[in-house]
Amino acid sequence: DSRPDEDLLAGLNPPQREAVTHRGPALLIVAGAGSGKTSVLTRRIASLLRTREAYPSQILAITFTNKAAGEMRERVRQLIGDSAQGMWISTFHSACVRILRREADQFGFTKSFTIYDSGDSRALVKRLVKEHEGDSFGFTPAAVQGRISKLKNELADAESYARQANMSDPAERVFVDIFADYQRALQKANAFDFDDLIAQTVYLFRAFPHVADVYRKRFRHVLVDEYQDTNHAQYALIHELTRPVVGKAGDAFSSGGMMIFEPDEAPEVEGASLTVVGDSDQSIYAFRGADIRNISEFERDFPGAKVVLLEQNYRSTQNILSAANAVIGHNFDRKDKKLWTDVGDGDPIIGFTGYSQHDEAQFVADEIEALHRKNVDYSQMAVFYRTNSQSRALEEIFIRSAVPYKIMGGTKFYDRAEIKDAMAYLIAVANPADEMAVRRILNKPRRGIGDVTETAIARYAASEGITFRDALANASALGVGVKVQKAIAELDAVLVEASEIMLPSSGEIPPSTSVTEGLRVLLNKSGYYDVLRMSKDPQDEARVENLDELVAVTREFARNNPDGTLLDFLTEVTLVSDADDLDDASGSVSLMTMHTAKGLEYDAVFVTGVEEDLIPHRISAGEPGGPQEERRLFYVALTRARKRLHLSLAMTRAQFGEVSAAMPSRFLQEIPHELIDWRQSPGDVNSRGGMQSRAINGRPGAGGSRFGGSGSNRYGDDLVPLPRREKSDALAKFTNRIPAKIRDNGDMELAAGDRIRHDDFGEGKVDMITGEGAKRVAHVRFDTAGPKKLLIKVAPITKL
Ligand code: ATP
Ligand code: MG
């Protein structure tokens, strides 16, 4: 055979080969996880290009995430070289943004439109619910936002919805008004929300066929990955793009000179060829309007479509596959698939039950380190959780254990501007010498203190030999206007008041709850909160919510550290927010939600929080099909693992400041028990900790404890609190008016072979030093505590 794409077919099994080489108007590839759907799609693109059946510019490939798009582009480039430029490989959203950036001025927007993320649109909805007194009908911003989103995904706008709604119901009328105002506000702001990006592109194509034709003529091959998760709007978009060209074909190629028709014979230009791949067992976006029927009705929608089934899994070991198959087998209403692999059983799945989420996180961190020592690269490990808020406990432990990590698909909480501002207020109180922090809050919120005044303050401080912060106490001496003097004096008063609460001049040690109280005073009396609350900018409402969350963090801190001080709090948070700096070239562990994990694969996977109310999530309980969708989500999580799978849970979990008992997820019981090797089973924790729990798999305590039955939990004490000595040092430093600072061993000269003493771990020998500057890490073998990695800058260590 001398097909020009023969090398692209190497190693493919017969149905995969067929899927790559089939040519025709429509092709559907349905198959279970890890069977090569995405690989086949990629090779198909490469094959179309290699055989010169298509120019790169004629290809539109849709992936579910930007990361997946990047990987696919790179893969195609590897297969056929740089000639792949000009292809569109992107998500639905970014493809639509590209189209809208070109065409937005056709229908009342400009090309510089902004995009509201879900936080922005939530804040806008919230304002409108308030304005329309929607709460008197029991409307919550989240529910209204969800409804609007769902309607948009079904391509309904406020007008069309009103036509079929029961408008004699006052609640319906209010909802329709909110929906209409919401849309007006977006238009006025020249903005699209996420759902609009798709829905408005469909609208554009339908309202302006000549615009649609441009894209129909261009994209001759449309390929869609993860088709099971397309919603109606996305489905409509694909239909619009693959429709035959409406306009005269003569125009179509007159410039390209490929195929010119006489205007009067003017046959339609055929629709693009469409390839979709999907797995109905991995449909996890029904809550956002994804419709599995898009797969099951594909053959009806595209008569004559070719269907290819793939059954061999190339990703996971048999143990992992068996667990995943067992779980998904509990869903009814599905076609049973026969996924198999020939790579062998592999390692058993490892189970662990922690006493708390910190305990669980420590297990994960320790296992990651153990795997890393066995030469598994950090970048080949991933940790999944059901909800974003679960990442905080993991992050805290990872930072302490110097496990490099990155969070996929989410902005780090502590990186947000408003959180940084609030932290700057706290730092201005805790460490008045930190001039940067004081400067940061000088004019936040705006109080008329500009650059000139800032310079005057600095100059005065220098001439008097006092700190920038102390200069604020002498506003009248600065030579600035009366109004500005007053603003400075007010800021000074707020800082003094908060300082009396958190660090009283009496020297008395305040209760740990004082951090919450002090933060409230700072945010309220400085006017920071009020300005955001009164703002009409929807983003500001999201900021208020973030600040509320920070207040909740201080409350949790107080609960966990009954004698914690402001400085302890700042130390904790500073370490958490330093996370990014730990990333280096040797790669990082990826943390993400189970939803984000779709389509990805890793050698080692940690699925955490395998508890009732998390997975299945408690919001799914009342939803029709909810628990089944949660089971598919869990199936997605399990099938990401190539060689090693860890399932963990905690028996107590603190969330939103509440500590409650957690129950093992029902999905655990669906996995044949011989597949899981419990390092510490729910039964172990039950018998020791006295927590109530159901025994899992009918064998409580089986699998043996990783602590050799000693009965003590080595994670019990050294979790979150700072070493005590450091605490009192910090307080002493402050009360002595020495600028207090977080512990800093910055220039400690450590080298391999040195012996050190650690406040908690005792004495040990340094094996090696990695990283540089603030990121230097000591790999220490402790005499009793074993191997640990320590961030030299902050670890409570002394050189012996
Ligand atoms: P998911 O349902 O999770 O999206 P998928 O069906 O898209 O999975 P891929 O990600 O394409 O599966 O493939 C899974 C793994 O199997 C990849 O590492 C891929 O390189 C490998 N693979 C696919 N086909 C073959 C093959 N014929 N020979 C060897 N490895 C293969
Ligand atoms: Mg895939």
Image (cartoon, grey):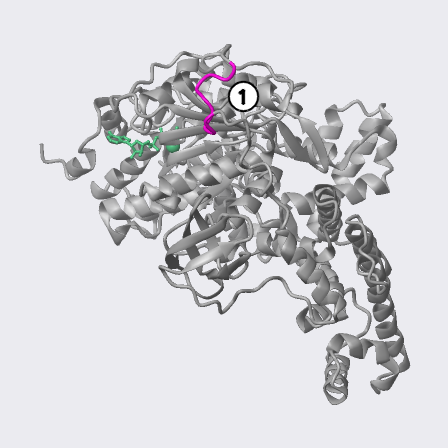
Relative side of 36 to 506, left or right? left
Picture layout, residue 449 above or below residue 636: below
Q: Residues within 10 Å of mark 1 (few under 14, many from 20)?
A: many
Residue 560 or 135: which is nearer the viewer? Answer: 560
Residue 666 is drawn in which quadrant?
Answer: top right
Where residue 595 appears, x then y in whole percent? 52, 33
The verdict on residue 144 being magenta is: no
Q: From this viewpoint, which residue is outermost toward the left? A: 1
Give the position of the N terminus as an image quadrant. top left
Relative side of 671 to 500, left or right? left
Residue 6 is drawn in which quadrant?
Answer: top left
Residue 175 or 567: which is nearer the viewer? Answer: 567
Where residue 757 appears, x then y in whole percent? 49, 55
**Ligand 2 appears in which quadrant?**
top left
Picture layout, residue 212 above or below residue 286: below
Where residue 70 appears, x then y in whole percent? 39, 47
Under circle 1, the secondary element is helix
Span of residues in magenta? 700-708
Q: Main secondary structure of the magenta part?
A: loop
List the residue tagged with mark 1.
Answer: 684
Number of callouts: 1
Picture layout, residue 434 above or below residue 238: below
- Report if residue 81 is visible in the image: yes
- Report if residue 248 is visible in the image: no
Where residue 700 appears, x then y in whole percent? 52, 15
Residue 708 is drawn in which quadrant?
Answer: top left
Residue type at mark 1: give it.
Asp
Residue 532 or 84: which is nearer the viewer? Answer: 532
